[in-house]
Image (spheres, rainbow, N blue to C red):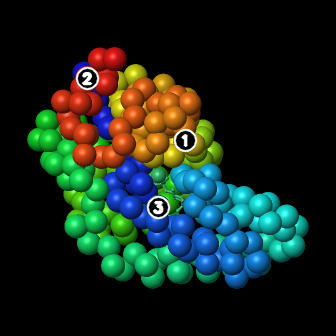
Amino acid sequence: KLEAVIFDLDGVITDTAEYHYVAWKKLGESIGIPFEREFNETLKGISRGESLERILRLGGKENSFTPEQKAELAHQKNEHYVSLLVDLTPADTYPGIAELLKELKEQGIPAVIASASKNAPQILRSLELDSFFQYVVPPDSVQHGKPAPDLFLAGAEKVGANPEFCIGVEDATAGVEAIKSAGMKAVGIGERESLEEAGADVVLPDTTGLSLAFLNKVLEG
Ligand code: B16
Ligand code: MG
């Protein structure tokens, strides 16, 4: 029986992935490292600090900044990102998500957030979804970010669920890898090829197909 559903946030619950892209792109341009959407895919699910490192590496500038300057760049990106978040309302929740969360709550199946984002609690409040989640794993509370399993394992442990009977839902390849190394079933949202390659048990093009009945089938295999 399904014991918990552990959700990624950005790209699964709502489209903040787009805001991250806009904010990182602007930051990149400000330091002479332009990039496009394709490169941005590799930043999904990756922490703020590590995302910055990857952008600097892309531009061959990993040694051009002191740790203090890097912290300031990450701060600038976050300021811009947070300024874009003020527009977020419940209407920005992806289709099917609110309905699924209601079903889970009615059945007493815990819903958990395993996001790399430090802004997750604020985003959930703006979407008015915070009361549907038993737990939001603080990204700083675990040792390793995605693709390591830490965030997903911490979520399962907090609600007393056995990973074997948990389902993780992710839009990023690093996230799908994290779910699989946690020993859970993985539902990928987005592009079939890359998510299947990362180990997803099933891939849906978007969130409309998510329901408790669907997740129960995934768990049965
Ligand atoms: P923040 P997820 C991740 O969230 C994003 O996919 C990633 O692009 C972002 O850099 C990371 O959160 C950190 O977010 O800067 O807000 O702390 O997909 O794991 O929900
Ligand atoms: Mg994501």
**Residue in the image at 54% along x and 52% along y:** 45
Q: In this view, does 41 lie above or below 127?
A: above
**Residue in the image at 65% along x and 77% along y:** 27
Q: In this view, does 103 lie above or below 129?
A: above
Tell me the distance, in whole angstroms, between the alpha carbons under discs 1 and 2. Answer: 22 Å
Pointer 3: residues within 10 angstroms few (<14), some, or many (20+)?
A: some
User: Closer to the camera, 38 or 178?
Assistant: 38
**Residue in the image at 18% along x and 30% along y:** 213
Residue 31 spot, x, y in % from top left: 75, 79
Q: Is residue 117 found left or right of 39 in the rendered image?
A: left
Pointer 1: residues within 10 angstroms few (<14), some, or many (20+)?
A: many
User: Closer to the camera, 100 or 1?
Assistant: 100
Amino acid beneath label 2: Lys
Tell me the distance, in whole angstroms, between the alpha carbons under discs 1 and 3. Answer: 14 Å
- Image quadrant in which you'd find residue 26: bottom right
Q: Is residue 96 found left or right of 83 in the rendered image?
A: left
Q: Can residue 3 be seen in this view?
A: yes
Residue 48 spot, x, y in % from top left: 61, 63
- Image quadrant in which you'd find residue 9: bottom left
Residue 42 spot, x, y in % from top left: 62, 52
The residue wearing badge 2 is: 217
The quadrant of the picture occupied by the N terminus is top left
The residue wearing badge 1 is: 173
Residue 56 spot, x, y in % from top left: 77, 65
Q: Is mark 3 on a helix, strand or loop?
A: helix
Q: Is residue 179 above or below residue 220?
A: below
Q: Does any atom of ligand 1 lie closer than 8 Å to the CB of label 3?
A: yes
Tell me the distance, in whole angstroms, between the alpha carbons under discs 3 and 2. Answer: 28 Å
Amino acid beneath label 1: Thr
The residue wearing badge 3 is: 17
Q: Does any atom of ligand 2 lie closer than 8 Å to the CB of label 1?
A: no
